[in-house]
């Protein structure tokens, strides 16, 4: 997608390695970074952050969130404890660089900054909580938090401060003294003693100070980055990547990599599509399919979106031509079809013109590009339908697969916050009888083909497959 | 001297306000209060003002380059009152030429306490009314807040201003307070706020972790409010005399058996508010004895503390404080309804403050008539020659003096800071 080059962007001598697993990201990476790494590290990190965000949106329990973060990190952003061998250094370097690239991508609007800080801070908390104690202590020694330690018994008994410290926490002997502005959350919840603008924090709340400091510094750094970035938007190699990443987060999801059909699956034929649509298609594709059946036609972008999707589902070129010809029958005469449409189908399979084998659209692309006009039915219904229409359509489409009125509030809440893919994931869970939060093997929907493929996998797993497809098919009439 | 006794200077009349702005408004004090020094700096030039004009029109994003500029504009526009907003990234009046650049950066930390929030407990007045008696609630609130802001947050430059009708505003100009983010302002509120919940919530104080003791800063507040409570709530307001209020009180005890017992007793023999209160205190002692605990550890004791808080702890309008870009009426504006000037209040003497004796614009202009100062001479450019200096001849003077004393403190800090920065004024803020 982007021209990968191995030319480094920043040319400096490699300096410090990474003695600790935790990182406050105070210093930008100074090593050589290739464009490949630039993009790849960022995308992997974004996957993790996006899942964290969707946990927030769905109000998942801390334990579930923790598990999700753990799983995601293992897959995309492993970070081993202890002091480093080569691998550890490499992981930490990736962590460091990925963070800084995303700073660049997400510094530009208040909303993106806020979301980025929230997700990053959750990730930091997770790592802090899972770090080895000695590592953590070593890391903390290096940081400047501006706190001093005080002991309760260093105060005179007549000192009212001593009385107050004991009044708040009779057992705490050591307290951190910091400016209250560094620990606003603790102040807000009355978890400290305040005296002349200083907050006295019980030792066991140390982590709160650290987390708030992490957020405070990151917020400040992002604002600075936002100012600085105006100076380097000349670098045309970076900008498209940053824009792409930003759009991904904006539409509430990570950047999905292109989806390719699993090897060696059963061949899919044109006459299987009705059945598969009813059982496995996400809302966007269901809408296109149902409209195609109703009108015996789809407009250009609809054909494009649906055609590429079907190709990746596994429809061969021959079957695709058969499928579309049949679908248009009654509306478009065969010779007109051959003249005007066949070429386009072959083209999208890479058999005409530039001979590019075009990939199917990701959710991000469907959501952010080629906004449908009033007559169009392509796009993502979660994004492009009015709330009323969406609710009616969801019940009509997925009612037979178990979607109930009571599922709608959670779905609509995600939609309201522009997390369309989270809504789509919820629908997947409901229609596949999965407990809330399971997702597609722990991930959110990022690609319609991923949705369809997981759904089919599930069916094949349940040996013999579902049977009730016969009546579910009738929604088109 | 020829003074027309029948004249009434109506505050809702534009010509009255015009005279007020020309002759009485203390521009210099307000200017230096906002600017912290004599030469204009961003604290003043990048500050948003908003003018309220007759017919509920508000003009926002006004800013001034100098004090003269402000004077001229106020007199030209003759607003019914005007409000003060944040210091911004750019001069608010330039916002059209630089789209998107206007962002609030700093502003005083402000609080608003309004008598309407006390309607469910005060018995002397309701709604828009306020009298010397209900001022007791405000006085109690100011004492608590002033103390917390000073001792907990370490703030020193705190100005209390009567809102002109039934409330009081607080403006904090310490450098740290000016620079607080919205997030941090919200935290201050969280620290201060105790009374929560609307009409349908009887118990409005829920500040204990797992039913434990009060946070030390709140027990300090209770300690100081214990002094106010009998006088204000029991003797003066007689808050527990009526049947309805008695029901509320018994509910708040949180102990059905004791409530039932007391209710029966009080039905047999009518008791005054303070007698009821002393009955409750007796119950605390006997409950403690029964449980073999110190009185302070009896559950009923906690309920009593919470009741003291519910009836006397400050009730503030939190929205005003949470955002830097909230507008708040300037001190020394005239309240259009009452004609009273929004004058500073000395927190040390707040209990002696009588809202009904605050000078009105009518009274002040008559005082000027009486000493024979006539309308101000105008310069050629249409500004009055000595705008705003006649207040010295009126009963507004002691109030301006309060502000000026407050400003001297701010100027001193600002001077020290300039000296530290090698006298480079541009380094400030
Ligand atoms: S979220 Fe993706 S898969 Fe789901 S309907 Fe929208 S575009 Fe289709
Ligand atoms: Zn009253």
Image (cartoon, coloured by chain):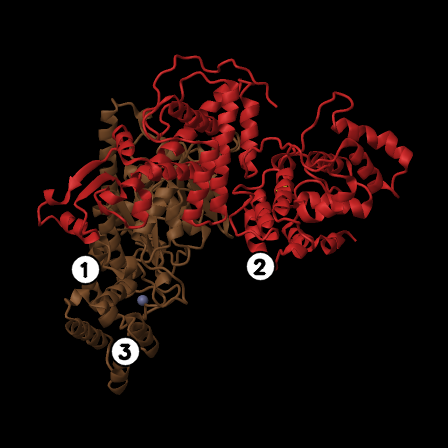
Chain colours: A red, B brown
Instruction: Where is residue B303? Give x, y as percent.
Output: 26, 67
The residue nearer to you, when weighing A405 against A320, is A320
Tell me whether marks 2 and 1 sit on the same chain.
no
Instruction: Where is residue A50? Give x, y as percent.
Output: 50, 38
Tell me whether marks 3 and 1 sit on the same chain.
yes
How far apart in space, not on screen, are marks 3 and 1 (Cα)?
A: 28 Å
The residue drawn where x is 45% and y is 23% is: A228
> What residue sits right under mark 3 in the picture?
B257
Residue farthest toward the front in the current orientation of the protein: A463
Q: Which mark is residue A406?
A: 2
> What residue sits right under mark 1 in the picture?
B223
Instruction: Where is residue B124? Give x, y as percent.
Output: 32, 70
The residue nearer to you, when weighing A380 against A78, is A78
The residue drawn where x is 26% and y is 23% is: B423
The residue drawn where x is 51% and y is 53% is: B55
What chain is tagged by disc 3?
B
Quadrant where the N terminus of chain B sits is bottom left
The residue drawn where x is 47% and y is 45% is: A56
**Kind of element beneath mark 3:** helix
Q: Is B53 positioned to the left or the right of A302 in the image?
A: left
Instruction: Where is residue A442? Give x, y as percent.
Output: 52, 43
How far apart in space, not on screen, are marks 3 and 2 (Cα)?
A: 42 Å
Q: Nearer the viewer, mark 3 or mark 2?
A: 2
Quadrant where the C terminus of chain B sits is top left
Does the Cβ of the disc 2 residue fall within 8 Å of ligand 1? no
**Kind of element beneath mark 1:** helix
Q: Earlier in the sequence, mark 3 or mark 1?
A: 1
Q: Is B98 positioned to the left or the right of A276 in the image?
A: left
What chain is tagged by disc 2?
A
Q: Is B138 positioned to the left or the right of A53 in the image?
A: left
How far apart in space, not on screen, are marks 2 and 1 (Cα)?
A: 50 Å
Q: Nearer the viewer, mark 2 or mark 1?
A: 2
């Amino acid at each position: 997608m982007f021209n990968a080059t191995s030319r480094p962007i920043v040319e400096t001598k490699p300096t410090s390695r990474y003695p600790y697993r935790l990182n406050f990201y105070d210093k930008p990476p100074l090593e050589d970074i290739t464009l490949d790494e630039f993009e790849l590290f960022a995308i992997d990190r974004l996957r993790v952050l996006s899942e964290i965000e969707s946990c927030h949106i769905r109000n998942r329990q801390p334990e579930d969130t923790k598990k999700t973060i753990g799983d995601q990190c293992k897959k995309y952003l492993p970070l081993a404890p202890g002091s480093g061998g080569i691998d550890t250094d490499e992981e930490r370097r990736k962590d460091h660089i990925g963070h800084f690239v995303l700073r660049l991508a997400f510094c530009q609007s208040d909303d993106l900054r806020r979301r980025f800080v929230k997700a990053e801070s959750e990730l930091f908390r997770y790592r802090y909580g899972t770090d080895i104690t000695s590592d953590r202590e070593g890391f903390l020694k290096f940081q400047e938090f501006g706190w001093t330690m005080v002991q309760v018994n260093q105060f005179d008994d007549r000192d009212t401060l001593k009385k107050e410290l004991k009044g708040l926490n009779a057992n705490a002997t050591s307290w951190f003294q910091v400016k209250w502005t560094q620990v606003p959350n603790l102040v807000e919840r009355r978890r400290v003693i305040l005296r002349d603008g200083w907050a006295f924090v019980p030792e066991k709340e140390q982590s709160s100070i650290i987390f708030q400091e992490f957020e405070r510094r990151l917020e400040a750094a992002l604002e600075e980055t936002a100012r600085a970035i105006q100076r380097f938007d000349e670098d045309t190699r970076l900008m498209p990547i940053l824009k792409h990443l930003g759009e991904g987060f904006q539409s509430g999801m990570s950047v999905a990599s292109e989806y390719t059909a699993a090897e060696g699956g059963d061949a899919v034929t044109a006459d299987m599509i009705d059945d598969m649509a009813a059982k496995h298609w996400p809302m966007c594709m269901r809408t296109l399919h149902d409209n195609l059946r109703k009108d015996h036609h789809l407009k250009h972008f609809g054909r494009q979106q649906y055609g590429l999707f079907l190709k990746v589902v596994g429809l061969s070129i021959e079957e695709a031509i058969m499928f579309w010809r049949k679908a248009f029958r009654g509306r478009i005469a065969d010779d007109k079809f051959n003249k005007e449409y066949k070429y386009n189908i072959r083209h999208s399979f890479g058999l005409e013109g530039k001979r590019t084998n075009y990939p199917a659209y990701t959710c991000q692309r469907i959501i952010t590009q080629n906004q449908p006009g009033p007559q169009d039915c392509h796009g993502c219904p979660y994004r492009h339908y009015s709330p009323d229409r969406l609710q009616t359509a969801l019940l009509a489409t997925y009612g037979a697969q178990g979607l109930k009125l009571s599922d709608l509030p959670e779905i609509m809440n995600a939609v309201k916050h522009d997390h369309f893919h989270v809504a789509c994931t919820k629908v997947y869970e409901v229609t596949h009888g999965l407990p809330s939060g399971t997702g597609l093997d722990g991930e959110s929907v990022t690609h319609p083909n991923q949705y369809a493929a997981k759904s089919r996998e599930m069916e094949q797993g349940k040996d013999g497959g579902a049977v009730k497809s016969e009546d579910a098919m009738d929604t088109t009439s | 001297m020829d003074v027309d006794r029948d004249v009434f200077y109506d505050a809702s009349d534009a010509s009255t306000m015009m005279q007020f702005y020309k002759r009485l408004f203390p521009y210099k004090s307000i200017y230096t209060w906002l600017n912290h020094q004599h030469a204009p700096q961003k604290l003043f030039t990048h500050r948003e003002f908003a003018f309220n004009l007759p017919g509920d029109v508000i003009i926002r994003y006004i800013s001034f380059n100098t004090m003269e500029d402000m004077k001229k504009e106020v007199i030209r526009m003759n607003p019914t009152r005007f409000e003060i907003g944040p210091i911004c990234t750019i001069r608010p009046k330039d916002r059209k030429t630089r789209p998107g650049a206007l962002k609030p950066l700093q502003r005083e930390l402000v609080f608003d306490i309004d008598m309407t929030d006390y309607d469910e407990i005060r018995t002397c007045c309701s709604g828009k009314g306020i009298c010397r008696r209900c001022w007791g609630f405000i006085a109690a609130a100011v004492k608590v807040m002033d103390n917390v802001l000073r001792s907990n947050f370490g703030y020193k430059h705190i100005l209390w201003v009567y809102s002109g009708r039934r409330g009081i505003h607080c403006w904090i100009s310490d450098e740290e307070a000016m620079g607080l983010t919205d997030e941090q302002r919200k935290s201050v509120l969280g620290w201060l706020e105790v009374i929560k919940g609307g009409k349908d919530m009887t118990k409005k104080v829920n500040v204990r972790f797992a039913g434990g003791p009060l946070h030390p800063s709140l027990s300090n507040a209770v300690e100081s409010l214990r002094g106010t409570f009998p006088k204000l709530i029991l003797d003066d307001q007689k808050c527990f005399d009526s049947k309805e209020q008695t029901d509320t009180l018994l509910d708040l005890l949180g102990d059905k058996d004791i409530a039932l017992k007391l209710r029966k007793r009080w039905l047999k023999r009518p008791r005054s508010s303070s007698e009821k209160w002393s009955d409750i205190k007796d119950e605390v002692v006997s409950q403690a004895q029964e449980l073999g605990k110190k009185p302070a550890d009896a559950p009923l004791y906690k309920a009593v503390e919470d009741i003291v808080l519910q009836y006397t702890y400050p009730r503030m309008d939190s929205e005003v404080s949470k955002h830097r870009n909230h507008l708040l009426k300037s001190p020394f504006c005239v309240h259009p309804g009452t004609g009273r000037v929004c004058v500073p209040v000395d927190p040390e003497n707040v209990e002696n403050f009588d809202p009904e004796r605050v000078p009105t614009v009518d009274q002040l202009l008559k005082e000027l008539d009486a000493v024979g100062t006539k309308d101000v001479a105008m310069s050629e450019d249409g500004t009055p020659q000595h705008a705003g200096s006649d207040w010295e001849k009126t009963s507004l003077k002691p109030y301006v003096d309060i502000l000026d004393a407050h400003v001297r403190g701010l100027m001193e800090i600002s001077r020290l800071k300039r000296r530290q920065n090698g006298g480079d004024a541009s380094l400030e803020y």
